[in-house]
Image (spheres, rainbow, N blue to C red):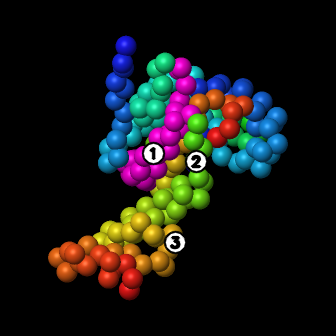
C-alpha cells in the first residue's frame, strides 16, 4: 500500500515521527505536491486543493480493479480494503468464480455464474 | 463554477507513475514506481488522503 497526499516527503517524515499512531506505520508515504496524480485519479477537490479519501486497488498488470472515494469526514475501514485485495487476488487466480457480498476470506463460498444460477442465487450462496 | 474532473475508472490501465516518498522502514526518502511494482508482480493499493496531521 502506498499512501498519497499533496504534502512533501519532508512533511511525511515529520508527521510519521511526531504522531504516536504512526509509530508502527510501515507503508511508503507518497508525495504529490503538484496534485497531478490526485487529478489523474479524479480525487482532487479543486475548491480546497486537497485530495479526497480515495482508495484504488491496482492489479500486477496495472489495471484498476476497485475504486472507492469518501468525502473528508468519513474514514476508511482497513479490514474492508484488505478483504477487497484478498478477494481480487483470489478472483485473479480463479477467474470463473465470483465473490458474493458476504465473502470474507479464502474458503468462503464463491459463486460460478451460469444459466443454472439464474434466479437461484439465494440457494447458491447457502451451499 | 462547477468543475467536472475526469478520473481513471475501474477496468482502465494506470500509466507508469513515479512518486517521491518517505519510507518509514528505512527512515529515509525513497521513490516508488508503478512500473517496478508491475515487474515484481505486486498488487498495489493507492490510498489518497487530504493532508498530513489529520485523521486518515
| In this rendering, position of residue A19 left or right of residue A30 | right
Residue A11, placed above or below residue A87 = above
Q: Secondary structure at mark 1?
A: strand
The answer to whether tags 1 and 3 share a subunit is yes
Q: Are marks 3 and 2 in contact (CB under 8 Å)?
A: no
Q: Residue furthest bottom?
A: A127
Q: Residue at x 38, y 86 (%)?
A: A127
Q: Secondary structure at mark 2?
A: loop
Q: Position of residue A19 (x, y in %)?
A: 80, 38
Question: Which span is picked out in magenta?
Answer: A48-72
Q: Of residues A45 and A36, which is closer to you in this image?
A: A45
Give the overall secondary structure of the magenta segment. Answer: strand
Instruction: Choose the circle earlier in sequence order: 1 or 3.
Output: 1
Q: Residue at x 57, y 41 (%)?
A: A74
Does residue B39 appear in the picture of this structure? no
Q: CA distance from mark 1 to mark 3?
A: 20 Å
Q: Of residues A7 and B27, which is closer to you in this image?
A: A7
For the residue carrying disc 2, how many other residues have a C-alpha within 10 Å: few (<14), some (14-19), or many (20+)?
Answer: some
Q: Are marks 1 and 2 in contact (CB under 8 Å)?
A: yes
Magenta span includes A75: no
Where does the N terminus of chain B fall, quadrant-wise?
top left
Q: Position of residue A6 (x, y in %)?
A: 59, 26
- Which residue is under mark 2? A76
Q: Residue at x 51, y 36 (%)?
A: A71
Q: CA distance from mark 3 to mark 2?
A: 19 Å
Label annotation for residue A68: 1
Label annotation for residue A105: 3
Amino acid at each position: 500500500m502506498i499512501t498519497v497526499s499533496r504534502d512533501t516527503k519532508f512533511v511525511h517524515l515529520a508527521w510519521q515521527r511526531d504522531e504516536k499512531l504512526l509509530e508502527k506505520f510501515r507503508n511508503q508515504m507518497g508525495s504529490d505536491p503538484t496534485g497531478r496524480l490526485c487529478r489523474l485519479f479524479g480525487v482532487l477537490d479543486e475548491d480546497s486543493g486537497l485530495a479526497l479519501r480515495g482508495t484504488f486497488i491496482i492489479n500486477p498488470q496495472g489495471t484498476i480493479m476497485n475504486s472507492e472515494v469518501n468525502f473528508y469526514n468519513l474514514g476508511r475501514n482497513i479490514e474492508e480494503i484488505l478483504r477487497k485485495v484478498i478477494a481480487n487476488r483470489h478472483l485473479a487466480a480463479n477467474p470463473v468464480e465470483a465473490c458474493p457480498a458476504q465473502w470474507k476470506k479464502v474458503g468462503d463460498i464463491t459463486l460460478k455464474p451460469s444459466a443454472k444460477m439464474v434466479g437461484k442465487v439465494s440457494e447458491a450462496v447457502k451451499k | 463554477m462547477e468543475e467536472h474532473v475526469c478520473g481513471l475508472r475501474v477496468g482502465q490501465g494506470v500509466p507508469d507513475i513515479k512518486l517521491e516518498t518517505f519510507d518509514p522502514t528505512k527512515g529515509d526518502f525513497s521513490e516508488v514506481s508503478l512500473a517496478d511494482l508491475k515487474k515484481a508482480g505486486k498488487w498495489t493499493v493507492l490510498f489518497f488522503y487530504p493532508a498530513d496531521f489529520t485523521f486518515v
